[in-house]
């Protein structure tokens, strides 16, 4: 018996990286999946964007586990597209239990190199897109009489990490969003929690951070803020998925408004 | 399928009943062997009944019924040497220790801070804070020497985040446990030893559900019952429930104890039905 047997999970940013890992980990433990991804370009990204082929690979890997999956190319900035994806998924599976608002971007820049475009895209996707995701899915959980919503924040959602001003602002916003939604949705037995990874071994977490070295060299005094206290430089997507699995499962049935760090000690260091 | 903590050994204080027994049983279900300690007697000034040696024997039985091994000892966390002896005997039996659950604690309440007696203050801080430090002090040398990392889980409380009224010593001790955790998380990280806290709201055990706590929640009634107090217990949580069950805390301890949480350290894992953000 899987730890989320019989549940249905809606996951954004599911084409690869953490999102794909969440889809697979939850499917391994018995969940069916609704997988959403933009599968397209965002300006200024320092890493390749996800593709329709990536999303198809997620579908293939979930199906190989014997679980059901529906996928859709949708931009979380587009509330109507999200709603359609939710409707289609619920039509297929008949229910929704778990929401993982995982989609996000990260464009490191020193503060004076952040352009209005980078600021706007980061806030629109990471913060407003997460809000859109909750708005599109929470009514289904209210109807169902309960559920678990997991918002992907970051160590940067708790700590003012350098060279990431729009990202830090957006992820602090996500932390606040989780806390506020937790209260309003509590009476429906819907739990809302945030997860806070340190660097993860994904395209965003590795290639996306490639430029950080020069920024740290230019301002070495604060570079240490990015250090993990555990002797590791990067975590695996699976480590975040295991936390998501715990929060998605009934093992955490009374856990809400928690900021759950998977950060190798970064925020306490 | 291998258990989630298969092959590990867990040292658990306050293991005779309540959350401690639940942790022992849950970890054993997932493949761990157990080193269990409990003072197994009443503590002066505590208004609910103390754990007994029969309680500790029942924990032993429940773990053994699962096919796991357990070494149990009657030991007071205030007594460093007794605690060290109990753990060392367990390690001699099993060969290693991997998980530490510093769970033993007491709840004395009812007086405003300036009215708390010297004795009550000392008992609470000696057990809830110094006892946790002793637990770590005896276990950490084993974890470092083994060189295979480890997971230490300290039981704090919603009172480790919030200033609960009329239980100053408890609140101070549970806040202090968070500080201990944060320092040790940094000190022990080079050894891959992780240190985290769990923060339960009210749990359905003798410590939280007894005539004295009903009175704490309903001072307006002379002899309040559980039914009289349930709405007041409910009022502190965001989720619509008055208290959680020991298994809910055990599931959090299990996650932190397992390799699923191998990069989780320095975190405060609240199992509090939203109590602390309310």
Image (spheres, rainbow, N blue to C red):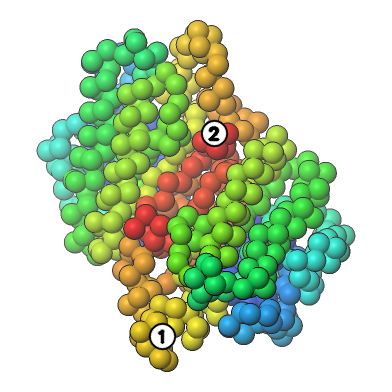
The quadrant the C terminus of chain A occupies is: top right
Q: Mark 2 points at which residue?
A: A266
Above or below, comparing residue B157 to residue A204 in the picture: below
Q: Do the residues labelled 2 and 1 touch (CB within 8 Å)?
A: no
Q: What element carries label 2?
A: helix
* Residue drawn at the location 56% of the way across and 22% of the way down: A224
Q: Position of residue B21 (x, y in %)?
A: 63, 72
Asked whether B164 or B53 is in front, the reply is: B164
Q: Name the residue under label 1.
A: B226
* Residue drawn at the location 25% of the way across and 63% of the way down: A188
* Residue drawn at the location 62% of the way across and 33% of the way down: A229
* Residue drawn at the location 38% of the way across and 74% of the way down: B233
Mark 2 crowdedness (10 Å alpha carbons): few <14, some 14-19, many ≥20: many
Would you say B143 lies left or right of A68 here? right
Residue, far bottom: B223
Q: From this viewpoint, is residue A220 visible?
A: yes
């Amino acid at each position: 018996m899987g730890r989320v047997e019989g549940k249905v999970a809606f996951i954004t940013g599911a084409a690869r990286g953490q999102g794909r890992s969440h889809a697979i980990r939850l499917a391994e433990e018995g969940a069916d999946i609704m997988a959403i991804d933009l599968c397209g370009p965002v300006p200024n990204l320092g890493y390749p964007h996800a593709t329709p082929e990536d999303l198809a690979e997620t579908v293939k890997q979930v199906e190989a586990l014997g679980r059901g999956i529906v996928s859709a190319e949708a931009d979380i900035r587009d509330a109507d597209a999200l709603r359609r994806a939710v409707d289609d998924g619920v039509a297929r599976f008949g229910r929704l239990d778990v929401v993982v608002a995982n989609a996000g971007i990260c464009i490191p820049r020193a503060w004076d190199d952040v352009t209005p475009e980078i600021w706007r895209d980061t806030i629109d996707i990471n913060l407003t897109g997460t809000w859109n995701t909750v708005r599109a899915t929470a009514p289904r959980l209210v109807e169902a009489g309960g559920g678990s919503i997991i918002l992907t924040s970051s160590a940067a959602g708790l700590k003012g990490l350098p060279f990431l001003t729009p990202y830090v602002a957006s992820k602090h916003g996500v932390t606040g969003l989780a806390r506020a939604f937790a209260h309003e949705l509590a009476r429906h037995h819907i739990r809302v929690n945030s997860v806070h990874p340190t660097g993860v071994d994904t395209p965003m977490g590795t290639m996306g951070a490639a430029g950080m070295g020069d920024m740290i060299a230019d301002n070495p005094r604060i570079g240490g803020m990015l250090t993990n206290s555990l002797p590791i430089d990067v975590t695996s997507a699976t480590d975040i998925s295991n936390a998501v699995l715990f929060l998605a499962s009934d093992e955490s049935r009374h856990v809400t408004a928690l900021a759950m760090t998977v950060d190798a000690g970064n925020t306490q260091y | 399928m291998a258990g989630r903590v298969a092959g590990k050994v867990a040292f658990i204080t306050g293991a005779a009943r309540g959350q401690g027994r639940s942790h022992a049983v849950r970890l054993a279900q997932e493949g761990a062997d157990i080193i269990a300690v409990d003072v197994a007697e009443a503590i002066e000034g505590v208004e609910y009944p103390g754990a007994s040696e029969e309680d500790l024997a029942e924990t032993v039985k429940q773990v053994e019924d699962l096919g796991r091994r357990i070494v149990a000892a009657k030991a007071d966390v205030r007594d460093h040497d007794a605690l060290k002896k109990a753990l060392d005997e367990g390690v001699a039996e099993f060969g290693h220790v991997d998980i530490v659950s510093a769970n033993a604690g007491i709840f004395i309440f009812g007086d405003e801070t300036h009215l708390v007696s010297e004795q009550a203050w000392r008992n609470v801080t000696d057990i809830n804070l110094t006892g946790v430090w002793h637990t770590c002090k005896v276990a950490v040398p084993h974890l470092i020497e083994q060189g295979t990392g480890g997971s230490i889980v300290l039981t704090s409380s919603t009172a480790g985040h919030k200033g609960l009224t009329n239980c100053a010593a408890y609140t101070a001790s549970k806040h202090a446990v968070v500080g201990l955790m944060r320092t040790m998380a940094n000190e022990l990280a080079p050894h891959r030893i992780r240190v985290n806290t769990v923060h339960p709201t009210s749990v359905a055990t003798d410590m939280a559900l007894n005539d004295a706590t009903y009175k704490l929640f309903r001072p307006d009634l002379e002899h309040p019952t559980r039914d009289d107090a349930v709405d007041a217990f409910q009022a502190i949580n965001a989720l619509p429930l008055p208290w959680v069950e020991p298994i809910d805390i055990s599931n959090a301890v299990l996650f932190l104890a397992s390799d699923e949480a191998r990069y989780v350290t320095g975190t405060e894992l609240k199992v509090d039905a939203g109590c602390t953000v309310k």
